[in-house]
Image: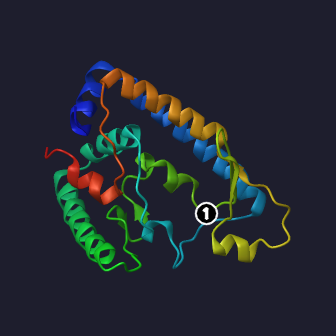
Amino acid sequence: MDLNDACRVLTTQQPDCFDRIAAIYDQMDAAYTVVARHYGFVCQGCEDNCCLTRFRHHTLMEYAYLQWGFAGLDADLRREIRTRSDDYRLSLQVAEGANQAFRHWCPLNFEGRCRLYAFRPMICRLHGLPHILRHPARGLIQGPGCHILEQDCQGVRPRPLDRTALYKALAGLEQTIRQGTGCKAPVGLTVAEMILAFPEA
């Protein structure tokens, strides 16, 4: 079963899965807001904007939810986003083939605004803040905030975003979805690659 077949199974046999995904994303957004307020940090976009950063996303859950949101856009906008996604994919192939740094706007970013903001994947929600993750095998994993936060918030008492419970919730739902659909296909796609893989309406 491929990713799109699995998405069709989800919409017919597990219609509550999108409510469950949305609830986990709400938890992520709330946790992010608490830590961002602690630092007095508001992301205004910068040259290290996460929308310019290549991220590959690895869960069927994120793929399915983004596809569901994408299907709700009007046809003209979907076509424009597909064109942007193809440009992104080609640029990424060139950069990776030449072992070059890659900076390219996410195809969903229109003048600084994400056209599928409510459906954006996990890392788009959590990027930028200092964080920790208590990994069952690797122990405590720590990461810094973005360079703007590190620069502007020097002297603020450290308060990293603990991603542990959020990752556990996401992993638990992913396992449920995988078992329910029988889909074992890996994801590992950028947002642009996901969009190009979505079925044509």
Give percent across and percent down for residue 73: 26, 49
Residue plotted at (23% across, 30% down):
8
Quadrant in the picture for residue 145? bottom right
Residue named by callout 1: 128
Q: Secondary structure at mark 1?
A: loop
Q: Nearer the viewer, residue 49 or 73?
A: 49
Residue plotted at (34% across, 43% down):
63
Local crowd size for mark 1, using a 10 Å CA cut-off: few (<14), some (14–19), many (≥20): many
| Quadrant showing the C terminus | top left
Give percent across and percent down for residue 150: 72, 72
Quadrant in the picture for residue 98? bottom left
Q: Nearer the viewer, residue 83 or 116?
A: 83
In screen coordinates, is 124 left or right of 57? right
Give percent across and percent down for residue 102: 39, 76
How many numbered callouts? 1
In screen coordinates, is 172 left or right of 108? right
In screen coordinates, is 45 left or right of 38? left
| Looking at the image, residue 20 lies above or below residue 112 | above
Residue plotted at (33% across, 73% down):
96
Residue type at tag 1: Gly
| Quadrant showing the N terminus | top left
Most distant residue in the top direction: 13
Give percent across and percent down for residue 18: 40, 31
Q: How is the image coloured?
A: rainbow
| Looking at the image, residue 2 lies above or below residue 15 | below
